[in-house]
Amino acid sequence: MSTVKKTKSTAKKPAVKKKAAAAAAPVAAQAVAVENGHDGAEGSGVRRRDFIHVAAVSFAGVGAAAVAMPLVSQMSASADVLALASIEVDVAAIQPGQSIKTSWRKQPVFIRNLTPAEVEEASKVDVGSLRDPQTLADRTKPGKENWLITLGVCTHLGCVPLGAAAGEVKGEYGGYFCPCHGSHYDTAARIRKGPAPLNLAVPEFAFISDTVVKIG
Ligand code: FES
């Protein structure tokens, strides 16, 4: 008896709701039928409520998917961002004693071809006396100790030090000089004087041929 009464009262619901439920029928009705073991087009008030509930969930699912797609799309790295993830630089034209500035992930990078004298100068330093103890070998690749590749970002407050371009001041230790607050880096770009706490950072890099280096 109670089942019949519920069916009658539900039949008086506004036509708008019926249309909404009917519109969702292809997906939702099948789900109700599977769940209840019945044809979802007829049934008790309980089944109709289930039907509306499933229809609402179905629409919510579609809405969530519609929102999620743009978000996923935005989270995917674009081609230009992926291109910036690593760079390849042919260093063949950089002569001993010369440096170039390039850019990687929107940060300046110094690539320096140390002279034999600069390599020797860097190698004879007592590492234990350094603020940030590292040997030149720690900061370069085996057999290519003359290629010093560092970020051009002072480790004090982030200024771009001088010394990579021709004619720029190299500081008291012949490497780089940050004029912002007076930090001096040596020929291995290690901090030797001034407020900077650390050596210029060495990014991940590898030589992929004798003269081409991949940074990143
Ligand atoms: S930012 Fe380089 S010394 Fe302060």
Image (cartoon, rainbow, N blue to C red):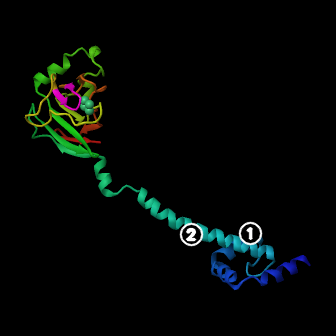
Quadrant of the snapshot with the C terminus: top left
Tell me what residue is drawn at x 23 percent, y 41 percent.
108
Quarter of the render that holds ligand 1: top left
Range of the magenta residues?
175-185
The answer to whether residue 124 is left or right of residue 73 is left
Q: Which mark is residue 62?
A: 2
Report the magenta stretch's main SS. strand
Where 195 falls versus 55 (above or below)?
Answer: above
- Residue indicated by mark 1: 35
Tell me what residue is drawn at x 77 percent, y 74 percent.
47
Mark 2, secondary structure of its residue: helix
Label 1 beta carbon less than 8 Å to ligand 1: no
Count of numbered circles in the view = 2
Q: Quadrant of residue 182?
A: top left
Tell me what residue is drawn at x 18 percent, y 29 percent.
177
- In percent of width and height, residue 84 lies at 28, 49
Mark 1, secondary structure of its residue: helix
Residue furthest right in the image: 1
